[in-house]
């Protein structure tokens, strides 16, 4: 089967798309139930996203303000996935496990700095 045929077949596989959506919703539910940091960030997004939509002068500013908040949630989900995987392997401390968790945490930290910088530059550049 050629590449084009595979692309067409994949695009028409509605069942796979529905299953993928279901897995995504399950992942969001798990994050909300099990991850305190994710819950805190969801609350901040729920408060700040409408504010960003109101404060943004045009579509680009709104996208920057709200998108930077969503990036924090995305990175937190990835960090939680790394932590869950490391914990699944074993609770015993290992140098590489600690490094993986620290790097995930650093990614969240950088995404929060990015959101703060974005909000500062958009709102205070007026």
Image (cartoon, rainbow, N blue to C red):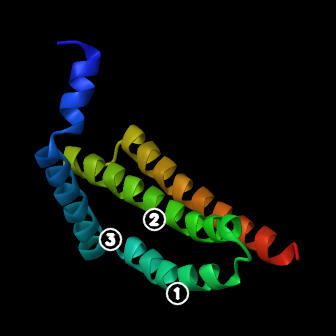
Labelled disc at residue 119: none
Q: Quadrant of the N terminus?
A: top left
Nearest to the observer: residue 120 or residue 58? 58
Would you call the spot at circle 3 few (<14 residues within 10 Å), some (14-19), or many (20 or more)? some
Taking the spot 23% from the left edge, 70% from the top edge, the residue there is 29
Mark 3 to mark 1: distance in Å? Answer: 19 Å
3 or 1: mark nearer the eye: 1
Taking the spot 24% from the left edge, 75% from the top edge, the residue there is 33
Q: Residue furthest right?
A: 126
SS at badge 1? helix
SS at badge 2? helix
Q: Residue furthest top?
A: 2
Residue 40, picture quadrant = bottom left
Would you call the spot at circle 1 few (<14 residues within 10 Å), some (14-19), or many (20 or more)? few
Q: Position of residue 94 (x, y in %)?
A: 35, 42
Disc 2 target residue: 73
Residue 50, picture quadrant = bottom right
Would you call the spot at circle 2 few (<14 residues within 10 Å), some (14-19), or many (20 or more)? many
In the rendered view, tell whether residue 3 sits above or below residue 86: above
Q: Can residue 92 be seen in this snapshot?
A: no
Q: In this rendering, would 15 be left or right of 73? A: left
Nearest to the observer: residue 114 or residue 19? 19
Disc 1 target residue: 47
2 or 3: mark nearer the eye: 2
Q: Position of residue 95 (x, y in %)?
A: 41, 40
Disc 3 target residue: 35
């Amino acid at each position: 089967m050629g590449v084009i045929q595979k692309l067409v077949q994949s695009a028409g596989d509605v069942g796979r798309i529905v299953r993928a959506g279901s897995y995504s919703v399950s992942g969001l539910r798990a994050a909300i139930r099990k991850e305190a940091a994710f819950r805190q960030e969801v609350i901040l997004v729920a408060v700040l996203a409408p504010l960003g939509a109101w404060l943004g002068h045009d579509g680009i500013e709104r996208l920057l303000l709200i998108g930077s908040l969503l990036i924090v949630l995305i990175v937190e989900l990835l960090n939680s996935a790394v932590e869950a995987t490391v914990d699944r392997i074993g609770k015993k401390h290992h140098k590489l496990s600690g490094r993986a968790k620290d790097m995930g945490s650093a990614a969240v930290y950088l995404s929060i700095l990015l959101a703060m910088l974005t909000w500062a530059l958009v709102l205070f550049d007026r």
